Image (cartoon, helix red, strand yellow):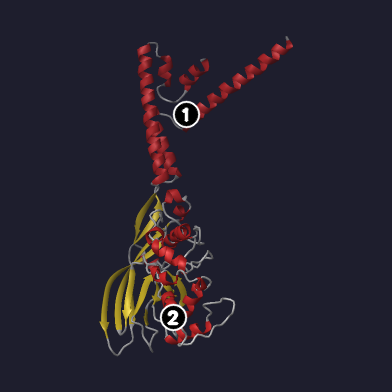
Amino acid sequence: MDLLRIFASESSIHGLAHLVRSPHWLEKAFWLTMLVFSVVCSVSICNMHWERFQKNATVLNVETNYLSWVFRPPAATVCSDHVSEDMLNQLLQRYDMIDSFSGYWQMERNHSDYGYYRRFLLTVNHARFDNLNTFAPFASDKNLASVSLVDLARELKYPLAPPWKTFAPVLTEVGVCYSSTKLYGFQSPYTDRPPTEMYIHVEQDVMTTDSSIHYVLREHDIISSSLSVEQVVASKALKQLSRLRRKCRLPGERLTHFGLYTINLCRINCRIEAALELCKCVPFFYNIGKTSCTPAGLYCLSRNHAGWYKSKNCTCQPLCESISFRQVLVKRKVLEQANSKLETQIIYPRMRMKRDVLFDISNLIVSFGGAAALFLGCSFISFVEVLFFVLEYVTKKVYRYYHRDRNRDRS
């Protein structure tokens, strides 16, 4: 008790000295009430600042020094259902639909199953995330269970000619498409037998059906489009924060089935997990090394479309740094003597958003110190005094206990 009195009388925390020195109990009660009130207010404000430090530490600022900015142009992904009759006939004559071990199977037009397997090839070629129910007629065919749908889909696509060789084939939710890392303007590659429609998606992320900008390019269409750029960048300080505090994700943060993070890859990751849970397989256009769906598995997914594709349990955080494009203007005209063509103009911005740290550890320390000084009048030294007196008390207790046992042993 003497040690507590010494601590209270010598501490720099306001009110403790009055609590010890006051002779009347009413005065002691007053100072005790004020001390409790000050401690509650100080703890409450410190807790408020701690919550801000943990959950609201970032801010979006506006940058206007556009002369030093660098942008990547958007990518173009071109998709079409076009398939040549020659390719269909070659596959029907070469590919073994009945016995996967025999290697080749000559199927001519007069074969009894020619129409059935031709419809199967067209179904694979037209396969999308939203029409997997078209595999229903083939779901019970065990001969097709060993057929690689990925290989078939890739072989069915029309081979592209120069300058389209810069477009690489990619698997998407609308089948096999061709993608390029740059988009300025291009003409349709189908000059001999043009398809009815081509879908062109514009973005910098992996293409999904959630893409915001896409064009339907029909025969003889000339489309002129203008895109504006919206960019968000992140400061170095923000990238060092934990994911909980920055409330966004960096591209290098892995997903379950992918080595990097984008919003579309996150959505695909959720769909893969849902498909594996519902039908124990994934569609062939998610070629990730997991069990690929047979026609029966694809039909199973079509019957559970809302469960695997529109998963409500999927939460995808935004990217800390991103570039998005907004369609400003689009014009379409038809020229009967011209090939299909898309021309794109990119309008680069003079303003962008920057994610930065607004409330860091130094602000937290200052906030704690201000709350403690306002209500208790104490500083960092006051907390050192508390620690010192606690250590002194424990040391004296241990010393007395040790010497008391030692004197008892001597006697």
Whether 367 is drawn above or below 239: the answer is above
Whether 362 is drawn above or below 168: the answer is above
Residue type indicated by callout 1: Ser
Report the residue marked by disc 1: 382
Numbered disc in front, either 1 or 2:
2
Give percent across and percent down for residue 112: 46, 83
Q: Quadrant of the C terminus?
A: top right
Specify the farthest residue to the top: 411
Secondary structure of residue under mark 1: helix
Q: What is the CA distance from the residue labelled 1 to the residue labelled 2?
A: 85 Å
Give percent across and percent down for residue 196: 33, 81
Report the residue marked by disc 2: 118
Occupied quadrant, residue 354: bottom left
Q: Nearer the viewer, residue 179 or 8?
A: 179
Residue at 37% over, 27% down: 38
Give percent across and percent down for residue 23: 40, 11
Specify the farthest residue to the front: 112
Residue type indicated by callout 2: Arg
Do residues under tags 1 and 2 come within 8 Å of each other at their CB atoms? no
Q: Nearer the viewer, residue 164 or 70?
A: 164
Instruction: Please indicate whether residue 156 sits to the left or right of residue 352 in the image.
Output: right
Structural crowding at the residue carrying mark 1, measured as other residues with C-alpha within 10 Å and reported as few (<14), some (14–19) or many (≥20):
some
Q: Nearer the viewer, residue 349 or 254?
A: 254
